[in-house]
Amino acid sequence: MIIVALLLPMVLGALLPAINFKNRRSHGFYIEGAVLICAALGAWALLKAPAPATLSLLGGQSLALLSDGAARILGLTFCVLWPLATLFALEYMVHDLRQDVFFARYIALLGPALALCVSANLLTLLIMYHLIHFGSLPLSSHSSGERAQIAARRQLYYQLVSLVLTVAGYVLLLSAGARGRFVYGGGLDTAVNERLRIAFVLLALGFGIGAAQFPFHSWLPQVTTGPTATTALIHDVLLVSSGAYGLARLVYWCFGTGGLTGTWAQWGPLALACLTIVYGSIMAFRVDELKPRLAYSTASNMGYVFFGLLLMTPQGLTGGLLHLIFHALAKMTLFLAAGTFILRTGVHTVQDMRGTASRLPVTTTAFTVSSFSMIGLPPLLGFLSKWTLAQAAGAQNSVLAWVGMGALLISAVLTCMYLLIPAVEAIWISRSADALPSRAVGGPIDISLMLLTLMILGLAFVNSPLFDAVSRVALGQG
């Protein structure tokens, strides 16, 4: 059944351009219905936790799938967010002449996204990771404008570097006589030596490119020139989350923490994560264009996740996974709200957001609530993940852990500034009525924004089951 859940999105996506729909409504019902069916089937397969599926290859290698606690955490996140992003895209892309091609690719990517989550060894995860990133390139260049083409090419170049790094790391791992199985505590079946530490760093850097970690981050702000429906779900949720998830599997399920903790293989990537946190926040504050500002914020917040994972403790893993989930929800909401501002008012910069709340109340509410969550205002989920990360850093009591805590504090202050300023200006600063379009409420865009906002608010008060589930996974009990 898990194989069917992974293949169905690609089949339904491929069928879309071949169907002659009678009207726009049936076209929309097919797209949203296909995503809902795929997401529901994927969620059922993840929760059922079927027996492992393995395909043996030459040289003793294999492709293997297995649903465990970590797979369910990220996979269910995708299954919840994909239909909501698709609902938004139905209205956002309505005037696009190539929308069938867009949605075919949009639906199809859910398959490898779920396959990434249930990868049971490093080879399978690497294949799915690169399939996702290279498969997203047509969506990045969908706008066909010069800026979109340049951005897609830059994304391609960075992913080629990621491919070289991860392949080199995997070959080095094999040459050391290690295996790449995913078993909590480590599945190398050999002691971690200096060669394997080099392999680890190469693989971590490769995953860091996908998660827009400094100094490999510049592709992400550039690809925001594409459709918001792509940026919100594919770039700033799927691609960056795949990099962070790859690192989590690498540290806790492949190499294990014993042979890495306290070595240069831990401190080097950890230092880059701290630098990314601060650098991304500074750049987000400096950039006035709305979508690139949010993209730099994504790089910074992925630095949070990498920092937690590289602490190499169960509490660090808990904080990193919590922040990964929270960021996916809050940042997708922010990007969809930003796309709505652009679509309905022509707003592209922070300064242009002044006074827009009177015309776009739902959009402004979604933007403001998700901004408060990104800042970490109690009791929103962002506070829980950031507090857990701070506790994990304090418990480790090392120089870089304390440097990381300083980076978290600096980033928190800058986040207040680069997210609250546009929210406050949208709500409190008046603007002449003729400078804004007529009041716009209703439709798939507002429904998706309202549902996402309710989810953020709901998780502020009902988050114990999520925290307990993530904590069990971090302890190897999930």
Image (tube, helix red, strand yellow):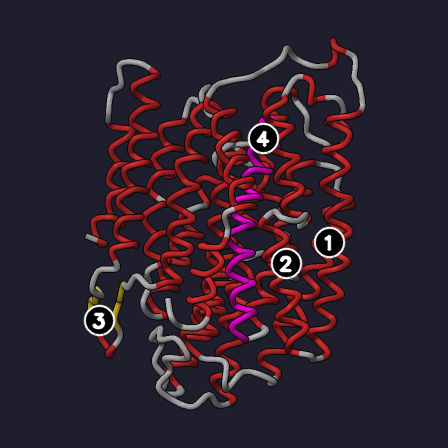
The image's mark for residue 44 is: none
Residue 28 inside the magenta-drawn segment: no
Q: Circle 4 sits on which residue?
A: 339
Q: Is residue 261 above or below residue 319?
A: below
Residue 200, given in percent of the width and then of the height, sits at 50, 77
- Amino acid type indicated by mark 1: Ala
Q: Is residue 308 left or right of residue 184?
A: right
SS at mark 4? helix
Q: Which circle's residue, 4 or 1, is located before the other in the chain?
A: 4
Q: Circle 1 sits on which residue?
A: 412
- Amino acid type indicated by mark 2: Lys
Q: Is residue 419 above or below residue 207?
A: above
Q: Is residue 205 left or right of residue 44?
A: right
Residue 303, given in percent of the width and then of the height, sits at 62, 60
| Disc 3/disc 1 C-alpha distance (Å) | 47 Å
| Disc 3/disc 2 C-alpha distance (Å) | 42 Å
Residue 290, given in percent of the width and then of the height, sits at 68, 36
| Disc 2/disc 1 C-alpha distance (Å) | 9 Å
Q: Which residues are magenta?
A: 313-340
SS at mark 2? helix
Q: Residue at x 24, y 25 (%)?
A: 19
Mark 4 residue crowding within 10 angstroms, few (<14) / some (14–19) / many (20+): many
| Disc 4/disc 1 C-alpha distance (Å) | 24 Å
Q: Residue at x 42, y 66 (%)?
A: 473
Whether residue 160 is visible: no
- Amino acid type indicated by mark 4: Gly
Between 228 and 135, the one nearer to me in the picture? 228
The image's mark for residue 57 is: 3
Q: Residue at x 46, y 75 (%)?
A: 169
SS at mark 1? helix
Q: Circle 2 sits on which residue?
A: 386
